[in-house]
């Protein structure tokens, strides 16, 4: 049943470019690409938030690091996409390791505030990078060059994003069902029992944090190719809030939740902003209502089981 | 000359610290007592600034504007508590963060609809506009001194209320064991609404005092909110004393860093490198400070748990 649902979901996503081209509505291809890029970010956050119980309020940091890695390399004429992706992943992983090493020592409210503060720190760093546009940002000099794949072609770019998103979902599912993932989930549900059976959660949590950061970096590298423009706003804290919301809206700790959440939030934003420029005045209360009444996200509406 | 500059920047730091304290006091009480993370605290700061500015323009009187701004922040705070915050007390921090995040979007946009996106400017009455000589050769704005005085007065009052009155006793009891206080017959819901409302009024006070110095614009609350988080993490959650000490540390470190990091770095490394690294490092300084404090004391300097 579940496999069948996935099959149709992937099939629908795979034929979307053909449909969109036939209807001559290229805008929706761009929207779908945006949704899937944010779905990658949301999947990576779900690994630490949904499965690991680490409420990171700074996941936009890795979008920014991935974006800046690609943007800065392109600025200096390095457009090899594989190299750019490698640097984006490496840099995000390194910074996630540094942030995680300090943050994971704390928990609860402290963890939320610290991850937020570190991201804010990177945001200010981005603003102070005057040679890369500072506060205003800069145009991406050239899209990433993946040899036979051309990101300038909207359909090819779409399939690259689709494949990477499916890979991220698959990888995350493999991880959480492995021994490593069991430790992460055990530490979420009862930390002292996990310690009592002889496992110290800290290194596992840190590794999960680093993996999530690296995947977030991939999303950032794709996002900068999507927008073709790089600003510190990639790392703005409202971005972190949005990614977090996607995870919660779709339903935490589920394979399809982050994708559903990203699609729901971005489509609602898209519709509201076509009605009025003051769409946030509607979106805000909608978020409040969904938190108060739909406790387990969209998934909770359809199933009655408790997670 | 240098001593005067250092002295003036130190006072600026204390002034920023005092404003951070007004914000942090409300936020840390709400966190400590109700175990609620309220991101919308910055929105209440903004609401205070806007209401006071609007009331001043409407009535033409500064004191009346201040009074209406404070009352407005109190009322808006209590209304937010009753409508949105109450269902969140029993939820985990994640839900609280998301719901109050929604509130921020709402308030920022609402303010933009009513007053526009451009900055508003608040004019000060004559008696707050001048400068005074504190040291020979230095003149310091009266208004900033007034902010420091108000902030310290609020800190003293707050200490008195929390440590010496019946309300303060209930607040402290609520912080250490909510269920027990409720079992003893205290109307805990009312207590929560009152504490939340007063926290909102303090945030509004900080906002309306910030108006004439910084610009009044949508989103003005977020910048200070994140600095206030740093204050609370450094000071320790639920501790008013920690909030005061943390706020002064953050205010002074941030101001001094912005003023002196570049010239000091210039003597150590090449001036061009300092030109680039100085401002970046200065804006990151308080976050680095927080990381150091956490590495040494993970629950903050004055944690009461």
Image (spheres, coloured by chain):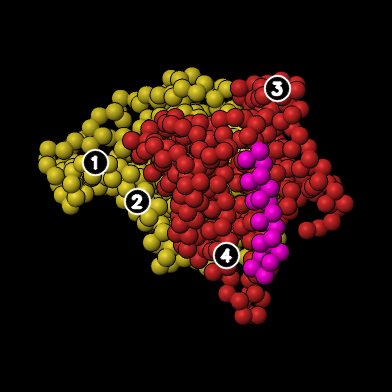
Q: Position of residue A115 (x, y in %)?
A: 51, 53
Marks 2 and 4 sit apart, C-alpha to C-alpha, by 27 Å
Residue drawn at (52%, 22%) of the image: B115
Q: Secondary structure at mark 1?
A: helix
Q: Which residue in the protein does label 1 denote?
A: B275
Q: Is residue A153 above or below residue B251?
A: above
Marks 2 and 3 sit apart, C-alpha to C-alpha, by 48 Å
Q: Which residue in the protein does label 2 denote?
A: B285
Please say if the residues under marks 1 and 2 sit with CB atoms less than 8 Å apart: no
Q: Which residue in the protein does label 3 denote?
A: A25
How packed mark 4 is, by other alpha carbons closer than 10 Å (few <14, some 14-19, many 20 or more), is: many
Q: Could you say which disc has been placed on residue A205 in the image?
A: 4
What is the display colour for chain A? Answer: red
- Evaluate whether label 2 is on the same chain as label 4: no
The yellow one among the chains is B
Residue drawn at (28%, 45%) of the image: B277
Please say if the residues under marks 1 and 4 sit with CB atoms less than 8 Å apart: no
Marks 1 and 4 sit apart, C-alpha to C-alpha, by 39 Å
How packed mark 1 is, by other alpha carbons closer than 10 Å (few <14, some 14-19, many 20 or more), is: some
Give the side of residue B223 with respect to residue A49, left or right: left
Q: Position of residue B249 (x, y in %)?
A: 34, 54
**For the magenta stretch, what is the residue range?**
A159-181
User: Which quadrant of the rendered structure holds the C terminus of chain A?
Assistant: bottom right
How packed mark 2 is, by other alpha carbons closer than 10 Å (few <14, some 14-19, many 20 or more), is: some
């Amino acid at each position: 049943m579940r496999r069948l649902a996935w099959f149709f979901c992937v099939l629908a996503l795979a034929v979307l470019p053909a449909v969109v081209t036939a209807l001559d509505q290229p805008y929706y291809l761009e929207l779908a690409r945006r949704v899937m890029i944010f779905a990658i970010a949301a999947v990576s956050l779900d690994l630490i938030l949904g499965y690991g119980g680490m409420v990171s309020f700074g996941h936009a940091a890795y979008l920014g690091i991935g974006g800046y890695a690609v943007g800065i390399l392109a600025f200096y004429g390095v457009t090899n996409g594989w190299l750019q992706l490698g640097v984006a992943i490496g840099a995000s992983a390194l910074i996630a390791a540094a942030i995680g090493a300090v943050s994971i020592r704390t928990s609860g409210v402290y963890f939320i505030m610290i991850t937020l503060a570190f991201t804010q720190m990177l945001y200010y760093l981005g603003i102070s990078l005057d040679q890369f546009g500072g506060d205003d940002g800069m145009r991406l000099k050239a899209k990433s060059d993946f040899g036979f794949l051309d990101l300038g072609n909207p359909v090819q770019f779409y399939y690259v994003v689709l494949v990477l998103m499916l890979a991220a979902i698959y990888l995350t599912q493999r991880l959480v069902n492995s021994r490593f993932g069991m430790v992460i989930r055990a530490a979420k549900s009862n930390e002292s029992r996990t310690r009592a059976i002889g496992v110290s959660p800290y290194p596992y949590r840190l590794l999960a944090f680093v993996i999530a950061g690296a995947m977030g970096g991939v999303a950032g590298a794709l996002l900068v190719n999507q927008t073709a423009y790089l600003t510190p706003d990639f790392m703005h804290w409202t971005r972190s809030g949005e990614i977090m919301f996607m995870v919660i809206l779709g339903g935490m700790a589920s394979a399809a939740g982050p994708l559903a959440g990203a699609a729901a939030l971005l489509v609602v934003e898209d519709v509201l902003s076509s009605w009025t420029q003051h769409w946030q005045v509607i979106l805000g209360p909608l978020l409040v209502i969904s938190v108060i009444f739909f406790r387990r996200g969209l998934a909770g509406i359809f199933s009655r089981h408790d997670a | 000359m240098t001593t005067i500059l250092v002295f003036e920047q130190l006072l600026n730091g204390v002034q920023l610290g005092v404003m951070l304290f007004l914000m942090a006091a409300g936020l840390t009480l709400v966190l400590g007592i109700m175990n609620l993370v309220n991101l919308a605290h910055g929105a209440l700061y903004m609401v205070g600034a806007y209401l006071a500015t609007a009331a001043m323009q409407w009535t033409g009187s500064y004191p009346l504007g201040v009074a209406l701004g404070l009352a407005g922040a109190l009322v808006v705070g209590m209304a937010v508590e009753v409508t949105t915050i109450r269902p969140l007390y029993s939820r985990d921090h994640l839900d609280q963060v998301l719901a109050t995040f929604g509130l921020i979007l709402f308030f920022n946009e609402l303010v933009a609809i009513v007053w526009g996106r451009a900055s508003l400017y608040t004019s000060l009455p004559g008696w707050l506009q001048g400068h005074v000589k504190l040291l020979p050769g230095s003149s310091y704005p009266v208004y900033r001194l007034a902010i420091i005085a108000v902030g310290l007065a609020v800190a003293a009052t707050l200490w008195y209320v929390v440590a010496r009155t019946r309300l303060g006793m209930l607040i402290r009891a609520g912080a250490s064991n909510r269920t027990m206080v409720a079992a003893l017959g205290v109307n805990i819901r009312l207590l929560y609404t009152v504490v939340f409302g007063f926290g909102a009024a303090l945030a509004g006070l900080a906002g309306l005092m910030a108006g004439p110095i910084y610009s009044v614009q949508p989103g003005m609350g977020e910048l200070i909110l994140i600095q206030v988080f740093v204050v609370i993490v450094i000071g320790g959650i639920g501790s008013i004393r920690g909030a005061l000490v943390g706020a002064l540390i953050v205010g002074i470190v941030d101001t001094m860093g912005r003023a002196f990091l570049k010239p000091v770095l210039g003597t150590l490394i090449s001036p061009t490198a300092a030109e680039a690294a100085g401002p970046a490092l200065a804006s990151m300084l308080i976050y680095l400070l927080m990381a150091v404090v956490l590495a040494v004391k993970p629950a903050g300097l004055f944690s009461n748990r």
